Amino acid sequence: MKIGYLGFGTIALACAQGLVEDGHDIIVSERSKTNATRMSERHGNVRVASNQALLDTCDVVFLGTTAEVADALLEDLAFRENQTVLSFMVGMPAEKIAKLVAPATFEAIVIPFPSIAQGGSPLLTYPKSPTTETLYGRANTIIPMKSEADFNEFLAAQALLSVVAKLMAVSVDWLSEKTEDPVAAEQFLRLLIGGSIMAEPITTPNVMSNLVSSLNTPGGLNQQLREFMADTGTYDELIDGLNVLSARLNRS
């Protein structure tokens, strides 16, 4: 299959890395030249092309540009019939994307995450995307949305990733300062948190609430820290922040 990435920033790069060993011909646009050059130099099945040359060649095209520049970029390009287009863009409705890429077939908005480069990533799609399942379903978990409204709520929730990473980074710094062993601090906390969350199969229900319950020994350290954070309003502020993001996404 000939697969193109129109716009080749961090997420598109990770997506291409996740497919590069699967035998596809991958064409990447000149946008973000550093990423494009790196991939084409490392892999014989990856080449760089202009935006229009990419569209003239590829069966499947992923739009890796941003909603802010999409109108100006896409209106000057000629898509083809029997071409499947998917979009990584946040903030542009599916209906509008479909008009911009006609007469190609717009299939879905797809939101991947950096871990797709290695596999084991969630991918949000709206609507259901057979192409995404075919290309990425073997190594990742595809989560299709029933509606664009649901899709927006999941987009709001995905921002939790940076919050959790920040909490981890702060904790690693604290533990490193206390012990003067930053390597062990980061390894320990990554294994502790990641291993505990992923110990059960991904299809197991109620993993998070069951984990909280299992760490609720009266007077225990876990309970004490969790209740301290509850008393300081941390969890209420988290919900407030998610509601702000939800309102923003549902206005667009």
Image (cartoon, helix red, strand yellow):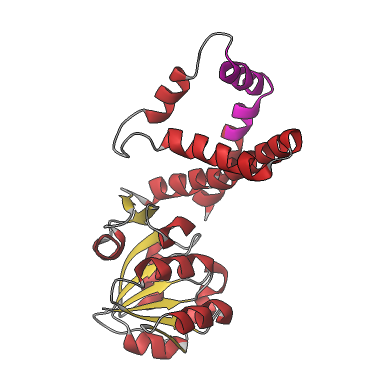
The image shows residue 219, relative to residue 159, as above or below, that is above
Q: Quadrant of the N terminus?
A: bottom left
Occupied quadrant, residue 184: top right
Magenta stretch: includes residue 234: yes
Occupied quadrant, residue 225: top right
Closer to the camera, 108 or 207?
A: 207
Q: Main secondary structure of the magenta part?
A: helix
Magenta stretch: includes residue 87: no
Q: Residue at x 51, y 36 (%)?
A: 193
Instruction: Give the x, y percent position of residue 248.
Output: 56, 49
Q: Is residue 251 visible?
A: yes
The image shows residue 243, relative to residue 53, as above or below, that is above
Closer to the camera, 226 or 240?
A: 226
Relative to 244, is 212 on the left or the right?
Answer: left
Relative to 120, is 230 on the left or the right?
Answer: right
Instruction: Give the x, y percent position of residue 24.
Output: 29, 77
What number of labels is visible? 0
Q: Residue at x 37, y 57 (%)?
A: 119
State which region is magenta.
220-238
Relative to 109, is 104 on the left or the right?
Answer: left
The image shows residue 11, relative to residue 184, as above or below, that is below
The image shows residue 56, relative to residue 222, as above or below, that is below
Q: Is residue 113 visible?
A: no
Instruction: Give the x, y percent position of residue 92.
Output: 47, 63
Relative to 135, is 122 on the left or the right?
Answer: right
Instruction: Give the x, y percent position of residue 161.
Output: 54, 46
Residue at the outermost top position: 218
